[in-house]
Image: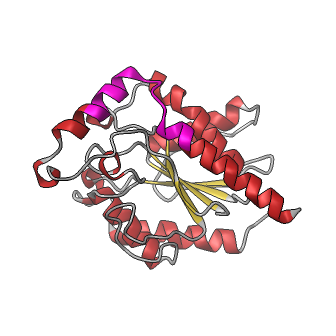
Amino acid sequence: MIVQLEETSENEWRALEAGIVACRRCPRLVDWREKIAVERRRAYRNEVYWGKAVPGFGDHAAPILVIGLAPGAHGSNRTGRMFTGDASGEFLYAALNRAGFANQPTSKNRGDGLELRDVFITAVCRCAPPHNKPERSEITNCQPYLLAEMRLLKHCQGVVALGKLAFDRVLSIYRSQGHIIPPSDFVHGAFYFLPDGLPWLQASYHPSQQNTQTGRLTVAMFDQIWDYARKMFKNPAK
């Protein structure tokens, strides 16, 4: 019976991922992601871009869900894997490796051997948006995919939100489900135990170059996020 349940879950994951990859709900994003895939950046002119919606990536039994904003135009939109192939991914996966969540510090492409332990990484939007700014309707169109991942992550104990948009979206989802969530401000490093047995929520600045190159998010600050997340799922308060 346990084997059958595990097989059912993996079948659900495969079906969800296939549905995400095939998604064309947002004409503006479809046009943009495909335009970028054809034009390509000079450094990647000999590569074949993914140019489709990007599914989540990681451990299907993870106690920690990591939520970012959206694929990068020449990162995930090129490689087809979350936070892969750009500076944000380099900063993120190096930190996850230091904290013991990733088997290697680099994330170059889908065949690079990267494996995640205890974390699953996804995003609010699955297509690269122009200027990294998805519209509200596009966020709404993508929400069922995030909800499905949250449902399938049956062992999830906590959520790390990378950026204010992801942080606010998680709280919005819980409130729409009828949970009474007290005021929760987005502050880097803020940690919230939520009611009704919901996963805890931790806020972090997004590892974008805008944050990392200006010193708004340092290596030490980011390492503290993952060290604390590991501590909390190993020694949950509830």
Nearest the viewer among 34 and 229 is: 34
| Towards the viewer: 138 or 44 | 44
- Report the number of numbered marks: 0
What residue do we see at 61% from left, 49% from top?
14
In the image: residue 92, left or right of residue 115: left
- Magenta extent: 18-34
What is the quadrant of the C terminus in the image? bottom right
The reply, left or right, for residue 64 in relation to residue 74 is right
Q: Is residue 30 magenta?
A: yes
Q: Residue furthest left?
A: 42
Is 68 located above or below residue 141 in the figure? Answer: below
- Say if the magenta span includes residue 41: no
x, y (%) of residue 63? 66, 63
Picture quarter containing residue 51?
A: top left
Residue at 40% x, 42% y: name it: 70
Q: Residue at x 47, y 77 (%)?
A: 103
